[in-house]
Image (spheres, rainbow, N blue to C red):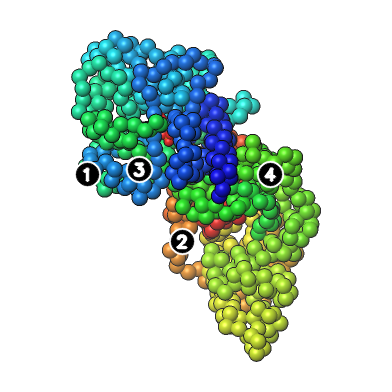
């Protein structure tokens, strides 16, 4: 780069950082994710490292971010409030530790993702509470801070005349969710995360608003103090506790960096289990005399460092929104994004559930979006970054016709959020999904019938639907390139497919029941139905009343069974399968196989009725597959299975952006685990 382009890039970065800081610190409505901000900041730092002449005193790297807004009176801090330097890797931590010179006792703390607050107590009474501001001057929020229960108005008699402490105001995740739900109810914009809601709630003109917000506080820094000197920061915290001030229970003193790395790892696993959000860990030299020797740079102490965990929210570009027609005809929009690494894996697609969701989130192709993926949770597009939206970007419009077969899409019932392709018999996409489903392990377990084979069978018109599967012959298969070698013989795959199909004819009756793709019959309820009606003929002959009378079936399931058999081409599937030697009766019921752990690591919440299940059997089905069945929706919920679209669980899931799956897809979830939600 030439000098001029370097300077331009520097000015550009400084400007973007300045703007982001204003949005974040003053308006409490950030436009960038923290990860995107950190990236800009790191680039600026690296640029200045290589070209120190660019590092002027007014560079963002030389300043504590933040400002004093005109809403609040300025307060000069007794001692400057600094920021923290960041480390994003163990190497960076090691470099920092190396500069300390030899083994150093460290105080490990969780990095609370809230808002810094400075408290001054004189004669044991709280006199001022101020935000960090620009580091020298903060905003006077004393009246607001007084409404926070954790901040004592008066210290214990043990406290000396002057006590200044720094700490973090935060909001518990559940309080944050409740706040957002009530904001939404009042038709107001929710906060993006607990840190913004803490900042937005504390920085209010009217302290009564703050009082209604359930803010909390932990001390994490010592300021001016007229009492006896303490040798170590951890001793200082003990004193603060005795004065009646709250200190995080998660702090830990360790002998040096190797032990601190253990702490970092432990808390990475507990990241979502604490009483507050955390975005990393702070390591501090515990010895106060050493802290004094090490001192400060212009924006941060040299004796402390923040280790940041990999971000769970990142920005990326939404390239387009596509729709997919599923096995039951449900048409699901999903976003295709510029691939991006989030929480350790590359993500480029995420479901958008239905047109209503796309509209609610107002995401448009071409938008920069916020993508969230926490741990094993399914990735989700949270929403657009509106300030970055190109002018005139058109909203996305849900197709009116099936992308696969061109049939006009319909709501099944008036007011349904989902649209369906009614061409169930021959919509290629539904057909392909159904063939694939017949082959799945929950159904007939036909190993060689994967996506490609299914496509090949359909392309060569070897099957019109799944009814033709079992009568396939080698002559049939030879008509498809996919199953024919260059020499004109059957491929190994083709031979195997015929063998697999032959073996599948004697699968247990409940497996066939699953294979038929009757709505609401999945591997959870199939054994119950099969027990009551020991053959396909018995099931076909049953009336709706007889069906409903069976324990575990219920009216919805009964109706879907009778509706299924009412369809000519459905009955033809059964006839053709029977003619091809499929048994479909209970003499073939085998010992239950060990349950596949499809839901391992997922937390599933169920609301409303799930056809074919009671509350208990649904929970059993989840836990039997290694999932966790939870009673309430939280950030940790992987998916909400919704039998109703009203109620608090549904609202909460919408607010939190927890993926929502219609109850009728519960069996699909049991079978395919996270994939059922992602597609
Ligand atoms: N999204 C955006 O647009 C945007 C804009 C500006 C800043 N930010 C975020 O803020 C960060 C920079 O802000 P910063 O300068 O306040 O640095 P920082 O938030 O990374 O670290 C400093 C702050 O950490 C807090 N903290 C929490 N727990 C602590 C503990 N145990 N000990 C000590 N301090 C603790 C303190 O309040 C302190 O002021 C960025 O890395 C980014 O994550 C985001
Ligand atoms: Zn279709």
Disc 3 is placed on an element classified as: helix
Q: Position of residue 368 (x, y in %)?
A: 62, 44
Q: Nearer the viewer, residue 590 or 381?
A: 381
Quick one: label 1 or label 3, which is nearer the N terminus? Answer: 1
Residue at x 60%, y 83% (from the top left corner)? 491
Question: Dot 3, how many residues are within 10 Å of its Cα: few (below 14), some (14-19), or many (20+)?
Answer: many
Q: CA distance from mark 2 to mark 4?
A: 38 Å
Q: Which residue is mark 2?
A: 596
Q: Is mark 4 within 8 Å of ligand 1?
A: no
Q: Quadrant of residue 585?
A: bottom right
Res. 312 visible in picture: yes
Q: Position of residue 376 (x, y in %)?
A: 47, 51
- Which numbered marker is on residue 102? 1
Residue at x 54%, y 63% (from the top left corner)? 442
Q: Dots 1 and 2: beta carbons under 8 Å?
A: no
Residue at x 65%, y 78% (from the top left corner)? 482
Count of labels in the image: 4
Disc 2 is placed on an element classified as: loop
Quick one: label 1 or label 2, which is nearer the N terminus? Answer: 1
* 96 with respect to 63 (left or right): left
Q: Dots 4 and 1: beta carbons under 8 Å?
A: no
Q: Which residue is mark 4?
A: 364
Disc 1 is placed on an element classified as: loop
Q: Which residue is mark 3?
A: 267
Q: Dots 2 and 4: beta carbons under 8 Å?
A: no
Quick one: label 4 or label 3, which is nearer the N terminus? Answer: 3
Disc 4 is placed on an element classified as: loop
Res. 611 visible in picture: no
Quick one: label 4 or label 1, which is nearer the N terminus? Answer: 1
User: Above or below — where is 202 with respect to 531?
Assistant: above
- Which numbered marker is on residue 524? none
Q: CA distance from mark 1 to mark 2?
A: 52 Å
């Amino acid at each position: 780069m030439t000098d001029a382009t370097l300077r331009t890039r520097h000015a550009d970065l400084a400007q973007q950082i300045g703007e982001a800081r204003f949005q974040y610190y003053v308006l409490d409505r950030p436009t960038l994710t923290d990860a995107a901000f950190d990236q800009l900041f790191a680039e600026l730092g690296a640029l200045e490292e290589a070209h120190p002449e660019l590092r002027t005193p007014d560079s963002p790297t030389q300043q504590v971010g933040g400002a004093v807004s005109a809403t609040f009176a300025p307060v000069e801090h007794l001692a400057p409030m600094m920021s923290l330097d960041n480390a994003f890797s163990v190497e960076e931590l090691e470099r920092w530790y190396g500069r300390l010179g030899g083994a150093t006792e460290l105080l490990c703390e969780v990095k609370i993702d809230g808002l810094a607050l400075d408290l001054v107590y004189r004669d044991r009474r709280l006199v001022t509470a101020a935000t960090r501001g620009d580091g020298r001057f903060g905003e006077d929020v004393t009246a607001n801070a007084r409404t926070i229960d954790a901040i004592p108005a008066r210290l214990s008699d043990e406290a000396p005349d002057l006590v200044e402490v720094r700490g973090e105001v935060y909001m518990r995740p559940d309080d944050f969710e409740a706040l957002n739900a009530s904001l939404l109810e009042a038709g107001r914009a929710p906060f993006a995360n607990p840190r913004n809601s803490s900042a937005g709630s504390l920085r209010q003109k009217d302290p009564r608003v703050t009082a209604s917000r359930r803010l909390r506080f932990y001390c994490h820094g010592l300021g001016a103090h007229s009492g006896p000197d303490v040798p170590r920061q951890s001793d200082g915290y003990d004193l603060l506790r005795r004065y009646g001030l709250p200190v995080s229970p998660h702090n830990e003193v360790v002998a040096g960096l190797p032990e601190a790395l253990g702490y970092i790892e432990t808390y990475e696993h507990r990241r979502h289990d604490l009483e507050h959000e955390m975005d990393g860990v702070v390591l501090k030299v515990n010895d106060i005399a050493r802290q004094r020797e090490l001192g400060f740079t212009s924006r941060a102490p040299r004796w402390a460092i923040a280790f940041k965990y990999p971000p769970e929210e990142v920005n990326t570009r939404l390239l387009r929104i596509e729709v997919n027609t599923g096995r039951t005809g449900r048409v699901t929009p999903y976003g295709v994004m510029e691939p991006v690494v989030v929480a350790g894996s590359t993500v480029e697609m995420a479901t958008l559930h239905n047109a209503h969701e796309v509209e609610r989130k107002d995401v448009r192709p071409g938008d920069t979006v916020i993508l969230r993926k926490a741990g094993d949770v399914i990735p989700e597009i949270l929403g657009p970054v509106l300030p970055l939206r190109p002018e005139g970007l058109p909203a996305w419009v849900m197709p009116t016709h099936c992308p696969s077969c061109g049939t006009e899409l319909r709501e099944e019932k008036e007011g349904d959020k989902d649209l369906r392709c009614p061409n169930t018999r021959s919509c290629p996409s539904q057909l392909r999904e159904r063939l694939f489903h017949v082959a799945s392990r929950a159904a007939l377990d036909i190993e060689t019938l994967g996506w490609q084979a299914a496509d090949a069978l359909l392309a060569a018109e070897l099957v019109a639907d799944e009814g033709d599967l079992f009568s396939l012959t080698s002559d049939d298969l030879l008509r498809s390139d996919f199953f024919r070698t260059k020499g004109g013989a059957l491929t190994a795959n083709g031979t195997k497919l015929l063998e697999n199909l032959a073996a599948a004819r004697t699968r247990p009756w409940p497996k066939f029941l699953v294979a038929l793709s009757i709505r609401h019959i999945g591997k959870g309820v199939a054994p119950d139905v099969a027990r009551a009606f020991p053959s396909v003929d018995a099931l076909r002959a049953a009336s709706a009343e007889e069906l409903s009378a069976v324990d575990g079936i219920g009216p919805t399931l009964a109706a879907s069974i009778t509706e299924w058999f009412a369809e000519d081409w459905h009955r033809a599937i059964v006839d053709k399968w029977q003619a091809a030697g499929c048994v479909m009766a209970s003499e073939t019921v085998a010992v239950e196989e060990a349950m596949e752990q499809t839901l391992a690591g997922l937390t599933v919440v169920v609301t409303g009725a799930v056809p074919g299940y009671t509350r208990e059997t649904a929970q059993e089905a989840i836990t039997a597959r290694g999932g966790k069945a939870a009673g309430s929706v939280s950030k940790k919920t992987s998916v909400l299975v919704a039998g109703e679209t009203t109620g608090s669980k549904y609202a909460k899931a919408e607010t939190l952006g927890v993926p929502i799956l219609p109850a009728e897809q519960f069996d699909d979830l049991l079978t395919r685990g996270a994939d059922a939600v992602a597609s």
